[in-house]
Amino acid sequence: MSEQTPAPQVGIIMGSDSDWPVMKPAAEALAEFGVSYEVRVVSAHRTPQLMIDYGQTAADRGIKVIIAGAGGAAHLPGMVASVTPLPVVGVPVPLKYLDGMDSLMSIVQMPAGIPVATVSIAGGRNAGLLAARILGAHDATLRAKLTDYAHSLTELVAQKDAALQATL
Amino acid sequence: MSEQTPAPQVGIIMGSDSDWPVMKPAAEALAEFGVSYEVRVVSAHRTPQLMIDYGQTAADRGIKVIIAGAGGAAHLPGMVASVTPLPVVGVPVPLKYLDGMDSLMSIVQMPAGIPVATVSIAGGRNAGLLAARILGAHDATLRAKLTDYAHSLTELVAQKDAALQATL
Amino acid sequence: MSEQTPAPQVGIIMGSDSDWPVMKPAAEALAEFGVSYEVRVVSAHRTPQLMIDYGQTAADRGIKVIIAGAGGAAHLPGMVASVTPLPVVGVPVPLKYLDGMDSLMSIVQMPAGIPVATVSIAGGRNAGLLAARILGAHDATLRAKLTDYAHSLTELVAQKDAALQATL
Amino acid sequence: MSEQTPAPQVGIIMGSDSDWPVMKPAAEALAEFGVSYEVRVVSAHRTPQLMIDYGQTAADRGIKVIIAGAGGAAHLPGMVASVTPLPVVGVPVPLKYLDGMDSLMSIVQMPAGIPVATVSIAGGRNAGLLAARILGAHDATLRAKLTDYAHSLTELVAQKDAALQATL
Amino acid sequence: MSEQTPAPQVGIIMGSDSDWPVMKPAAEALAEFGVSYEVRVVSAHRTPQLMIDYGQTAADRGIKVIIAGAGGAAHLPGMVASVTPLPVVGVPVPLKYLDGMDSLMSIVQMPAGIPVATVSIAGGRNAGLLAARILGAHDATLRAKLTDYAHSLTELVAQKDAALQATL
Amino acid sequence: MSEQTPAPQVGIIMGSDSDWPVMKPAAEALAEFGVSYEVRVVSAHRTPQLMIDYGQTAADRGIKVIIAGAGGAAHLPGMVASVTPLPVVGVPVPLKYLDGMDSLMSIVQMPAGIPVATVSIAGGRNAGLLAARILGAHDATLRAKLTDYAHSLTELVAQKDAALQATL
Amino acid sequence: MSEQTPAPQVGIIMGSDSDWPVMKPAAEALAEFGVSYEVRVVSAHRTPQLMIDYGQTAADRGIKVIIAGAGGAAHLPGMVASVTPLPVVGVPVPLKYLDGMDSLMSIVQMPAGIPVATVSIAGGRNAGLLAARILGAHDATLRAKLTDYAHSLTELVAQKDAALQATL
Amino acid sequence: MSEQTPAPQVGIIMGSDSDWPVMKPAAEALAEFGVSYEVRVVSAHRTPQLMIDYGQTAADRGIKVIIAGAGGAAHLPGMVASVTPLPVVGVPVPLKYLDGMDSLMSIVQMPAGIPVATVSIAGGRNAGLLAARILGAHDATLRAKLTDYAHSLTELVAQKDAALQATL
């Protein structure tokens, strides 16, 4: 379902393949906007050195934005952010208990010096869209696509409104 | 304390000047990295049309990232994000009650389609650093400065460690 | 299921048709009391200009109360309230996570100057009843119906009590 | 600071005079808009019969909106709403612990049938403004004043913006 | 399933028969200890006068403890406590959202002067046991039964332990 | 300030003398109603055997109600309840962090079989009043005093109302 | 599934056999590392004396670590910790409501003097691993096994990554 | 105030010297029990490589327990636990907002495989005592000291009780 290219602009990482259902919409959003990406399972706790290596080499490999999803004591986004100068988007993955509040706290409450761009709980699609916006900040063509997308949302609301009116 | 230039790259907005103590560190962080910025009081609730105008024209004016701070039912970051294709960084400003949890919920839990890059409660400095990282994604010089900054943090820890050892 | 008239007194709006199951009881309550209403899908984030237009013209079209439902970072009630002098009733729609606490925080914690009359999480029926009470403040006939309704609730409790006694 | 008239349109009630600092801004807001009001200490727990009498006779005395403030297990707004067909605005008063979350839960989470129009924690001023909006729904002159007030907020933001620019 | 007697010692009340599944274990616990009780549907919001009458006459009718269950903005326990000198046990009934936290806050956070003896969320059985303990404070026979019951719990743990050992 | 008698009816216990400011109002309330009591520092964690001994012998010493205050992981009320058939009133003592929510959870969420009559956070006075109500369930004279007290609260509200009216 | 030996090093206790599904992974983890253990149903509330006896004799019986699971007002871990000098690992067992937040608060917020080593909500496996680490602190062979286990986790991530790549 | 020795058994680490007031009681507790320790400022986010090195070499240097304190998105305890087989004790340090709930969530909710022994918010002293218990599991002399300490707590309660009695 993806269009991975030799030189991905966005790196999507997660601690376990069980996070993929939440993170896949990030990949899909990027694909919709023609943004190349890669997907990797990288764990802060289970592969700390791999995580550091991934973060430290990402910029040199041409990655411009990293999207990291994690749940519970979710350390991956913040730890990757500590070893790269790139913007890191954090996705709080909800686990079986607490509805993702633990994940959100662990990702968003970073100390001064190391920011993580946190999106909503289970907000994989918005993570992809945010990465597209970040790339679009320097890419007028991509930005135009994003504006078109916003118009399509407006249109969608009109359609939903019409459909609802029809049922009244 | 700022170095506003004719063509700011980052727009810092907030609903009231009472948010300035939280947002000023964003401006200071940008200044440290030589990133031009502007500061505006723009309110989602009190100046809705101005807010829309600000968001809709920001990209054309050369703004690349918008940082928006708000407290309570904090609608400014999300509303601005709905009228611009630019990345919007949201800063939850804590008010007198609830320690900023209401602000955080109102900013981070955006619906699919309109992302806001949320930082920590009262995380003005990290908002500035995140904006710098976003700009640095396409600017190797700025990225190098961010890497230098990370090294300075490492150095700072070493100094703090030494100072603590001295007191033991 | 509604009885929309040419000149509705209450406007029921929501960000998506997925909110309709929560909001439909508002419409049903108004219908029970013979209050005319309209239903619209209007999104703060996906149709910001439409939302502003809706709010700014509502009073002139004869609308006297606006009921707005939204979930997550629920900005619709507060944003509409910022562009109309009419009373706005906000309904926190619960989403998949957090049981509607994010929706409630985003709706009820409005800053001084722009009130939203917030009802309970998923409280669509009470939103309709509140709108009826607001209209009834100047309409003795409607107020009498509301008093009759209160009596019917009293009666209903008596019936439930009898039914429960029968099972003991 | 008030302008109580023989025939008040709004009744402001609270369980204890210790709630007055939170509720006084409601009275002040009403005074600003020329809305007559009365202020009473009425407690759901300490004067249950008085509370019922107050609620049951309010409409006949000409009261059109009741504003009720309470803290902790805050039963006053909901209980009054159960004995009047008038719209009741509830103000969660924060006590020493829990930042008003208990007050908010006790006021906003009313069962279907008995709505309370809840405003923000300690939101006395917004309670007054909401009452004015409710009255304004049938009073074009008052509604025009509310629109003027909204314009004054817009103007205020412009002034704050200018003041902030001057300090940069 | 009950043994209602002409002169019940405990009154079990709830706002709706939908609370019965949570409250029935209270009745069952009382029956186990041979304590007479009555069950009534009485609503603070839908039958405020009935509620006051019930509370004000309970002691004279021979009731010694009132158990009241309610959910959401749960006012029944506290309101009944305000019109009776008897001890009132409150049971927070969990509703569809918030897991009973709103019910708990509304019941336990009573202001000084009007206590409610709150048990756990959905803790109907413990409410019945607490009523039995209250009666047992003046009844050595009942107290002895409660001590026997405690011994039976100890025995039950031993049985569970044995059963678990058998599976290892 | 107390009137300890040779045969106290209520035992007030707490884990540390630092809880005394919260618990003293319980003693004062009992004194107001002429109920004899004793005060002891007994800790679930620091004196587990003493705690068990205290609970197991209380009924035989004539104690009819035990009031136990504790903070944080507040085990004292529940543990004492497990070794006595007497009613145990639990007072959540707020510590430096979390506003007493941890204390409340640890006290109120008791498993089926062992009830604790929980009052509000820092609700020492209500604990004393609840103990008086429990004793009053079998003591018409005490019950009459409690009714008089309720009347005095009603009177107090009237005085507060008059005082507030005088300031308007 | 266990390998209980005559001289267990770890004692796993829980208040009810209903906690076993959460606690069984602790036993399984110990078995994987060849650590001997015993499993007992011991309840703070239903068998207080047994609990004290268990805790007081554990060290003399050769137990080196106690793992205690409990839910709601979860007193078992803290109470056992108060009667043994051994390290006690606490497992918050989630009950039907509140997702284990009450269990966590009741276990982790112990007063100064009596520590409990708390793991995550429903974190039975981590409790077993923590006990193994504690034993490994003085056992190089066991520590080497733990290091091997960490390597296996690293390997597992690589496999998951490969599997995910295969699906893209 | 410490007694650092050439071969410390416990390593106390924290992300910043601003955490020292919370962590110092851990050092003091260890000193009371004659346990050697070292103190280091090591940051997960600011010195990720140093943190990994510290964790990976700790066991070989003779460290048997690591105590790690951190606040907000508190990653230090969990990250160190991922690179050492030693038991890691986590101390949630409360920051300016949220009373340490974010710190607690980020530390205690570790994924299966990597346990952290979490103590209470700001529970530095208990972290030290827990480390002593862990060491005492293999050291009868230390365990005896811990038992003596428990007795001293019992004695302290008796003194506090006597002091309180004297004031009644």
Image (cartoon, coloured by chain):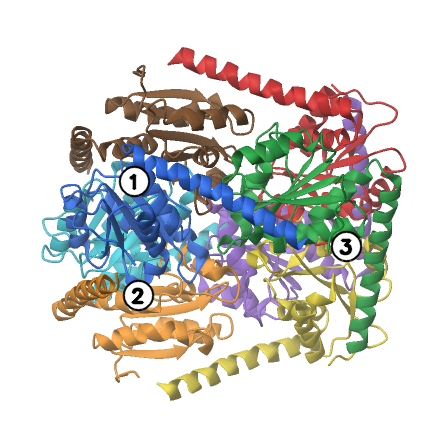
Chain colours: A orange, B cyan, C blue, D brown, E green, F red, G yellow, H purple
Query: Residue C105: horizontal and vertical position, in percent?
Result: 39, 47
Q: In the structure shown, which secondary structural element does the residue marked by tag 1 occupy?
A: helix
Chain letter of the residue beneath label 2 in the structure image: A
Residue in view at x 81 percent, y 37 percent: E137
Comparing E19 with C142, the one in front is C142
Query: Residue C146: horizontal and vertical position, in percent?
Result: 37, 39
Query: Residue D89: horizontal and vertical position, in percent?
Result: 37, 34
User: In which image quadrant can residue A31 be found?
Assistant: bottom left
Comparing G65 with C112, the one in front is C112
Measure the C-alpha gap from mark 2 to mark 3. 47 Å
Asked if residue D144 lies left or right of residue F71, the reply is left
Residue of label 3: G44
The quadrant of the image that shows the N terminus of chain C is bottom left
| Disc 1 residue crowd, few under 14, some 14–19, many 20+, Cα 10 Å | many
Residue of label 1: B19
| Disc 3 residue crowd, few under 14, some 14–19, many 20+, Cα 10 Å | many
Mark 1: amino acid? Asp
Mark 2: amino acid? Asn
Chain letter of the residue beneath label 1 in the structure image: B
Comparing D82 with C161, the one in front is C161
Residue in view at x 56 percent, y 25 percent: D46
Residue of label 2: A126
Q: In the structure shown, which secondary structural element does the residue marked by tag 3 occupy?
A: loop
Mark 3: amino acid? Ala
